[in-house]
Amino acid sequence: MSIYPFTYTLHHILLLKLLAAFPFERARTLHNFLFLAVANSPPAQRVGIRYQFYKGTTGVHSFEIESFLNDLKKGEFLNKEDLRLTKEGHDFYSQVASLLRYESFSQYCLQLALKYQNNLWQVNHEVMFHPLFRKSKTGRKIILPVA
């Protein structure tokens, strides 16, 4: 058994799950996808999910999600140049995947990703028309509804 150099959270495992199951080619698409998931899910379903999103010119950005991705790259679970899992990433994910079994937000994310299937580029398009995105100013934090 190997010793992992970082402490990984359920957020890290959720990202591994999404990246193992779906072909996110760009980090921007992953940020936009998680924005749509958080913005469209009921508040009771996203307990413990506290991502902050900032409006950019081509979508949203979350420094928390970027930090989780960087942790996974430093741990060599993701390729440095793209968002594909390495062999170590697949091995680690298979060891910890069962931790998400009772997380309702991860189940919602999977259902939403299945809706898009091979059209993940559509996520980038839909973000531009989301009401929360449209009423925010570029560079500012997007305020998500609490209840």
Image (tube, grey):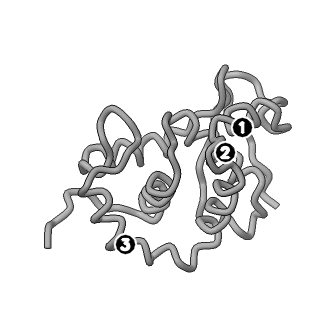
Q: Position of residue 85 (x, y in %)?
A: 35, 50
Residue indicated by mark 1:
142
Q: Amino acid at mark 1?
A: Ile
Q: Which residue type does callout 3 highlight?
A: Val
**Mark 1: secondary structure:** strand
Query: Label 1: how many residues lie within 10 Å, few (<14), some (14-19) or many (20+)?
Result: many
Tag of residue 96: 3
Left or right, 8 with respect to 47, comes to: left
The quarter of the rendered structure image containing the C terminus is: bottom right
Report the amino acid beneath label 2: Phe
Mark 3 burial class by Cα count in 10 Å: few <14, some 14-19, many 20+: few
Please, is residue 116 above or below residue 137 in the view? below
Marked residue nearer the N-terminal end (1 or 3): 3
What mark, if any, has residue 99 been given in the picture? none
Horizontally, is 126 left or right of 46 in the view? right
CB under 8 Å between discs 1 and 2: yes
